[in-house]
Amino acid sequence: MLFYEVKGGALRVRLTGDLDHSAATRLRGELDALIAQTGAKRLLLDVSDVPFMDSSGIGLVIGRYKLMARRGGSVAVVGSNERVDRIFNMAGLYSLVERRA
Amino acid sequence: MNVNWINEMRLDFAALPENEAFARLAVSGFLLPLDPTMEALADVKTAVSEAVTNAIVHAYPKGGGQVRVHGRYDGEGLVRIDVTDTGRGIEDVAQARQPFYTTGGEERSGMGFTVMESFMDAVEVKSAVGRGTTVRLTKRLRTRDEALPRRA
């Protein structure tokens, strides 16, 4: 289940639970459906309730970044902890997507 | 190097994505008697998750197959986890370990080995085409006791 809200053209989605390959495979489809439904120009991925993440999180965010860029939009990661940041920084992710507290 | 292992476990499971969480949680539970810091435990969990995911995504392109996780530790907190599949193997291990290198079409970042190397002390890969791959993860865990500030 995904918790989300749309405000001023921005779609904010709260991811919950472990973000691994299994979860990323499922989330990909759900997120893309939400983006298409809402027509959002900005995607905010709130990861503050993600207790565990591996490199699958990188693939998920880069995939959504590419999708939003094709739509002329952008992506931000919200509420990342130190571990999530460490993994995202290995891939230079924050040169593509904004990091918000 | 001869290591005097004091505990050992083996876990065999089907190469299915829904077993990724099971594998890392089982390893985490196995290591609890070492009283590791949360950070150290998370490091190992993340590396195991990467190695197990690699086996599940890449080893068995026709489906099926098993993954084995073999864990050991010694009395000094040295932890070794071997993640083994009997799948198609890796042709060029050095290339597979390069950051951003991936053959997984489905939005894989190619950062799995980079993450393993960052979180473990050592990552060794043995692979034979058509026979399978073993990823050996080694790390000396800091216990919570060691992490406490020392009095002078």
Image (spheres, rainbow, N blue to C red):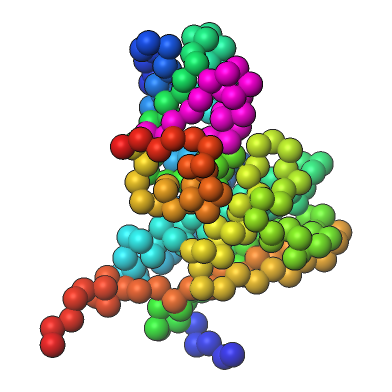
Magenta highlight range = A60-78
Horizontal and vertical percent position of residue B65: 74, 49
In the image: residue B65, left or right of residue B114: right
Q: Residue B42: say if magenta.
A: no
- Relative to the observer, which residue lies in front, B126 or A31? A31
Horizontal and vertical percent position of residue B35: 31, 69
Residue drawn where x is 59% and y is 90% of the image: B1
User: Does residue A64 appear anywhere in the picture?
Assistant: yes
Q: Please determine whether, in this image, residue B58 is positioned above or below residue B125.
A: above
In the image: residue A32, left or right of residue B91: left
Horizontal and vertical percent position of residue B139: 48, 73
User: Does residue B132 appear anywhere in the picture?
Assistant: no
Task: State which quarter of the image contains the C terminus of chain B.
Answer: bottom left
- Relative to the observer, which residue lies in front, B62 or A66? A66
Residue drawn where x is 75% and y is 65% of the image: B94
Residue drawn where x is 39% and y is 62% of the image: B41
In the image: residue B137, left or right of residue A43: right
Q: Please determine whether, in this image, residue B72 is positioned above or below residue A89.
A: below
Q: Residue A61: say if magenta.
A: yes
In the image: residue A38, left or right of residue B70: left
To which quarter of the image does residue B124 belong?
bottom right
